[in-house]
Image: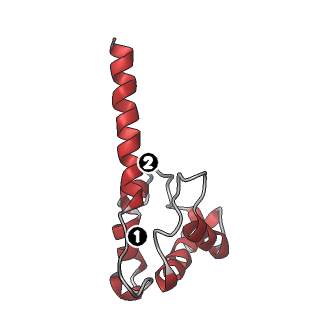
Amino acid sequence: MKKKLLTFVMGTALVMGLAACGGGSDTSKNKGTDTASSGDAQKIVSQKCASCHGDQLQGVVGPSLQKIGSKYSKAEILDIIKNGKGGGKMPAGLITGNDADTVATWLAAKK
């Protein structure tokens, strides 16, 4: 009985964590410029990524991004932001337009 309860609790926590990564729908007309004045990568990441990657990029449900620039180039990071990764583990399109480019540049510098 305890094993079934633990499995249920862990499964629920995983589902809730992944749901938080989705962030909701974006109904703004000017995508890519709707957050943080399109320039403050840290603020964009705080708003769009912290629920999965942590407030210090330490990793929570998603992996740590603290040294992501040593693993991926800016172009690769931008591709992951735009197209997602891991069969939906990293959803596509959470950050768009200039914001995506700004965040990719900022993350690529983290080595």
The residue identified by callout 1 is: 45
* Whole-percent x, y for residue 18 in the image: 42, 49
Element type at mark 2: loop
Please give the name of the residue rendered at 46% of the width and 73% of the height, measured from the top-left corner. Answer: 95
Asked whether 105 or 110 is in front, the reply is 105
Image quadrant occupied by the N terminus: top left
Asked whether 24 or 2 is in front, the reply is 24
Dividing the picture into quadrants, the one containing residue 52 is bottom left
- Residue sitting farthest toward the top: 1
Element type at mark 1: helix
Asked whether 85 or 36 is in front, the reply is 85
Asked whether 109 or 83 is in front, the reply is 83
Q: Amino acid at mark 2?
A: Val
Tell me how far mark 2 sits from mark 1, CA to CA.
Answer: 15 Å
The residue identified by callout 2 is: 61
Q: Amino acid at mark 1?
A: Val
Image quadrant occupied by the C terminus: bottom right
Please give the name of the residue rendered at 40% of the width and 25% of the height, measured from the top-left corner. Answer: 7
* Whole-percent x, y for residue 27 in the image: 35, 77
